[in-house]
């Protein structure tokens, strides 16, 4: 039945080409048979019986290998596809250890509370078997009652928690957990690919704090990590836990057939090559999926878009199928836990046919059988693409995935190069445990937990001595008898935000409803989201930001019936502090180093819903923010400048276009979002008096993205040249050199000059890049 529904839906997509839709490519991904293996030693009979009771009579190859490696006392990372049974790779060794030694303990860490709750249900099913009924476990998070916390500390064999609770609630109170830590055998990091960038740096430091505390009680647990596919799983896992890790990646799980459609919105304006709104396309397709009875998740890149899509699709259904209006919902961070659990339950049960979700639903929460996934824009990484598409078609069923390309360089590159999308190696997952801001935060926490000693330098790695000196200079630590003590009266872990480097967030307060708090906005992005005049969407309802109190951390809102949304405009300045590395390339010198970035939101745009037409631009007077981070930069030679000018092209417009396009393409090489990086181009930078292009990490201290660009800059330039030179537009468009974040209204930009500059930068490097008429 589902197969015929999917075929009918694909037929509808083909037919819709006549009304301007563009089905650019259909990838037929064949089914894959399961492959099975047996561990070198049989599973414990009680565990074997419990698995058979759940219908598991054979193990996939990767499951058997993982069990063997863990039994051999190795740290492992399991890297297999969605719904491949990774949880068994840690549940089996854990339950076997507890059956052999009732004092054995395990700590399961999940990036979200929802995932921990989901895994509780799996353990409930396993331990329903009589022989496992004495195994005690529970979720230990912010929602756990004080009495349950006390009981779990004393009795639980398995604690399911998250990094935030480990940092704030468990490690600072380790004395209360002495029995648990003394007998800790395994630490599980599920969905480990999520721990990259600034979150990855925090979690890497947190794991080192955990290892210190375990050592205090004579325990040296093994680590079991589970990850989506990344280019460097062993390196990434090793950076997270600070030691060598065995990679288990022989995926033996079966896979049903999948059709993957690449869909490009048609041109709204053939002269400018601007495409029709991706939200209009997504609304039509989502509404049709729901009308066809195909259960789906529609993945979007931003919270605001989830709400917009819910609003638009309900409007569309109200006109044609009002009985289906309440069978779709949004799902994103910011909702209360009870609201999210109810949406998950409704999706699992089939009460909901469609959910517009951020990547909060990308991870392995069990939401039942889905028929389709709709990806509104490339999700930023190959790993996320596979995770999101893999949410549909579990248990060998046929499924459909549709990727709608956004009007930006990365999406359009993949739409035009489907072989890159389906055949390329995933990106590198990047973390920098030595980020001095992150490291100093965690060293203060570590000193609170137990005074730091000389041996801790080897554990925390490069940057330890500098961060230690900084903490002592600030009066946070004090040295006595060769040990470093935390000497303040507060509780340092309470002020460490693992999800960023900013402090306390802003409360979104509805002043029309008794000052009801709608949600909390993190401080790092608040000025870009809740500036006065902004439209903020919550649960499908529009709110106008009427006031932003920077001192009190409050954004006041009023409900509004708005037919527009808003976009911020920002400007940046960069000051070079010092260069750490230089590469002498044939056409230029490339630098990597430390910079100070100054950012300021200077205004916002009002954009018409559905059409995305610009309605107005409004100025703002908000304070600038600044931070130090890492960047790569290069200059453009006098010879290249002269060549651009001789051709009658705009040199500054060319620099600006190269900057935009390189920022758009860098996420293809480094596992990051376009919003994780920023850039600047100038014909005469104040620090060098030379034409300069910068790309910087968007987090204080840096997270490794700029350094990956520094290492792979030739590939970055080649791919950028390919994108710009082959874009069918005449003078530049959102698909190649225009940026929605540009504070200068995308002026000046010169596509032809960008091609000349990129060709010149690549001269003399291996494989100079494409040479065709568009380039010449």
Image: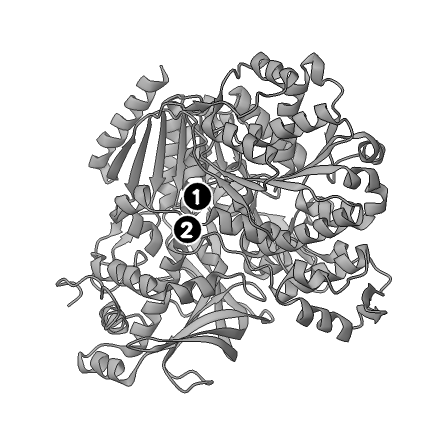
Q: Position of residue 708 (x, y in %)?
A: 44, 62
Front residue of 403/196: it is: 196
Front residue of 67/201: it is: 67
Does the rendering let one see residue 561? no
Residue carrying label 1: 383
Residue visible at 30% across and 51% down in the picture: 412
Residue visible at 53% across and 31% down in the picture: 86
Residue 19 image-quadrant placement: top left
Badge 2 crowding class, 10 Å Cα cut-off, few under 14, some 14 to 19, many 20 or more, is many
Q: Position of residue 231 (x, y in %)?
A: 42, 48
Does the rendering let one see residue 427? yes
Q: Are marks 1 and 2 in contact (CB under 8 Å)?
A: yes
Residue visible at 30% across and 43% down in the picture: 423
Determine whether 622 is above or below 63 in the image.
Answer: below
State the SS at label 2.
loop
Instruction: Give whichever of discs 1 and 2 has the lower sequence position.
Output: 1
Is residue 636 shown left or right of residue 194?
left
Can you say which quadrant of the picture contains the N terminus? Answer: top left
Residue carrying label 2: 427
Q: Position of residue 422 (x, y in %)?
A: 31, 41
Residue visible at 29% across and 40% down in the picture: 263
Determine whether 670 is above or below 710 in the image.
Answer: above
């Amino acid at each position: 039945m589902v197969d015929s529904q999917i075929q009918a839906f694909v037929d509808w997509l083909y037919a819709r080409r006549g009304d301007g839709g563009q089905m650019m490519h259909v990838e037929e991904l064949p089914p894959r048979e399961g492959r099975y293996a047996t561990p070198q030693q049989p599973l414990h009979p009680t565990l074997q019986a419990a698995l058979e009771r759940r219908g598991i009579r054979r193990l996939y190859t990767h499951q058997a290998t993982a069990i063997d490696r863990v039994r051999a006392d190795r740290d492992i990372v399991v890297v297999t596809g969605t719904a491949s049974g990774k949880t068994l790779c840690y549940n089996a060794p854990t339950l076997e250890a507890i059956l052999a030694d009732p004092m054995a303990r395990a700590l399961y860490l999940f990036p979200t509370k929802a995932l921990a709750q989901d895994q509780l249900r799996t353990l409930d099913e396993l331990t329903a078997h009589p022989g496992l009924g004495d195994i005690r476990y529970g979720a230990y998070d912010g929602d756990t009652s004080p009495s349950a916390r006390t009981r779990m500390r004393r009795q639980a064999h398995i604690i399911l928690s998250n990094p935030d609770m480990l940092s704030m609630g468990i490690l600072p109170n380790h004395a209360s957990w002495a029995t648990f830590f003394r007998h800790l055998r395994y630490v599980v990091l599920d969905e480990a690919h999520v721990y990259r960038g600034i979150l990855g740096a925090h979690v890497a430091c947190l794991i080192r704090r955990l290892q210190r505390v375990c050592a205090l009680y004579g325990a040296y647990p093994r680590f079991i990590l589970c990850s989506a596919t990344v280019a460097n799983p062993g390196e990434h896992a090793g950076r997270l836990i600070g030691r060598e890790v065995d990679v288990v990646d022989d995926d033996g799980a079966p896979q049903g057939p999948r059709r993957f459609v690449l869909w490009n919105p048609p041109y709204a304006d053939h002269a400018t090559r601007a495409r029709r709104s991706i939200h209009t396309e997504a609304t039509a397709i989502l509404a049709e999926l729901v009308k066809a009875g195909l259960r789906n998740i529609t993945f979007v890149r931003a919270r605001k878009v989830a709400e917009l899509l819910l609003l638009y699709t309900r409007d569309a259904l109200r006109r044609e199928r009002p009985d289906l209006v309440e069978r779709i919902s949004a799902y994103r961070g910011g909702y209360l836990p009870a609201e999210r659990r109810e949406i998950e339950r409704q999706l699992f049960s089939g009460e909901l046919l469609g959910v517009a979700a951020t990547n909060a639903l990308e991870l392995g929460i069990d939401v039942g059988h889905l028929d389709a996934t709709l990806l509104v824009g490339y999700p930023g990484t190959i790993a996320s693409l596979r995770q999101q598409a893999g949410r549909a078609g579990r248990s060998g069923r046929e499924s459909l995935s549709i990727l709608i390309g956004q009007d930006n360089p990365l999406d359009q590159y993949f739409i035009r190069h489907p072989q890159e999308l389906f055949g390329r190696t995933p990106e590198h997952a990047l973390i920098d445990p030595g980020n001095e801001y992150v490291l100093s935060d965690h060293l203060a926490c570590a000193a609170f937990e137990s005074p730091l000693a000389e041996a801790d330098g080897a554990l925390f790695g490069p940057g330890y001595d500098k961060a230690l000196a900084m903490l002592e200079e600030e009066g946070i630590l004090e040295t006595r008898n060769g040990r470093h003590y935390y000497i303040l009266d507060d509780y340092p872990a309470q002020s460490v935000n693992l999800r960023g480097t900013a402090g306390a967030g802003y409360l979104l307060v509805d002043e029309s409803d008794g000052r009801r708090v709608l949600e909390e906005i993190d401080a790092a992005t608040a000025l870009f989201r809740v500036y006065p005049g902004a439209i903020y969407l919550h649960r499908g309802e529009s709110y106008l930001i009427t006031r932003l109190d920077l001192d009190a951390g409050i954004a006041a809102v009023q409900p509004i019936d708005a037919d527009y949304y808003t976009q911020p405009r920002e400007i940046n300045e960069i000051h070079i502090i010092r260069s750490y590395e230089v590469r002498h390339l044939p056409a230029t010198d490339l630098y990597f180093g430390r910079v100070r970035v100054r950012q300021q939101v200077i205004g916002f745009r009002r954009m018409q819903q559905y059409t995305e037409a610009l309605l107005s631009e409004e100025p703002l007077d908000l304070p600038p923010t600044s931070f130090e981070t890492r960047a790569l930069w290069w200059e453009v030679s006098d010879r290249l400048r002269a060549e651009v000018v001789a051709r009658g092209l705009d040199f500054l417009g060319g620099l600006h276009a190269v900057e935009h396009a390189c920022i758009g393409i860098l996420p293809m090489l480094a596992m990051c979002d376009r919003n994780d990086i920023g850039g600047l181009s100038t014909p005469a930078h104040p620090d060098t008096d030379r034409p300069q292009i910068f790309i910087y990490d968007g987090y204080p201290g840096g997270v490794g993205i700029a350094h990956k660009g520094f290492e792979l800059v030739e590939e970055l330039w080649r791919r950028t040249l390919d994108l710009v030179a082959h874009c069918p537009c005449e003078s530049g468009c959102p698909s190649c050199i225009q940026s929605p974040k540009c504070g200068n209204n995308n002026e000046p930009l010169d596509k032809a000059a960008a091609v000349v500059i990129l060709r010149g930068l690549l001269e003399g490097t291996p494989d100079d890049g494409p040479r065709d008429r568009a380039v010449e």
